[in-house]
Image (spheres, grey):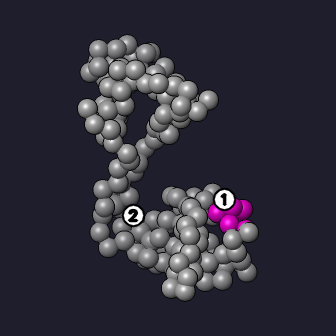
Amino acid sequence: MGAGTVQPDADDRRLIMATQGGLPLVPRPYHALAEQLGLGAEDVMARLTRLLDAGVIRRIGAVPNHYALGYTANGMSVWDVPDECIDKLGEQVGRLPFVSHCYHRPRHLPHWPYNLFAMVHGKSREEVETQVQRIADLLGGDSRAHDVLYSSRILKKTGLRIGG
């Protein structure tokens, strides 16, 4: 079932708007949302499940603040790997426990040869470099070149927002 097969009603829209900034940080967030919206908790959970299944919303998940957790040496590792292997290699790299996200991006030759990106978090640059070496070992001869771009400041990450 695709997003086009479900038309969010007014309560769905209010629920989406109430959650797009995050779930309430309470022991029972769906119950808190239900109370805020004047709905039942079971209704809130059923609506979110329906919207997820239909693809109207992509996911509900925790987004940790790596800096608050002590992971202040954050590096985007960038890799030049053969295009015909990128799906297989990206899946392998993305499964590593220290990689928070991994994705394919286009090259911009001749200045940017990298097509595989993997975000690595560490408590020091040395830790990040060790993890990047583990990625290099995993990729072996499929890695023709790589680099690490370290974060210089914190950017607020948000998804698509809808207005009221």
On the image, the x and y values in percent for residue 25 come to 31, 35
Would you place residue 58 above or below residue 30 in this image? Answer: below
The residue under the point 58% across, 33% down is 2
Query: Looking at numbered disc 1 in the image, what kind of residue is underneath it?
Result: Glu
* Mark 2 or 1: the one toward you: 1
> Is 89 placed left or right of 102 in the picture?
right
On the image, the x and y values in percent for residue 35 come to 29, 17
SS at circle 1? helix
* Main secondary-structure element of the magenta-colored stretch: helix
The residue under the point 69% across, 61% down is 87
| Quadrant for the N terminus in the image | top right
The residue under the point 32% across, 38% down is 162
Q: Is residue 77 visible?
A: yes
The residue under the point 29% across, 14% down is 38
On the image, the x and y values in percent for residue 150 come to 40, 75
Would you place residue 136 above or below residue 21 in this image? Answer: below
Quarter of the image holding residue 133? bottom right
Check disc 2 and report the residue beneath it. 71
Q: Which residues are magenta?
A: 85-90
Check disc 1 and report the residue beneath it. 91
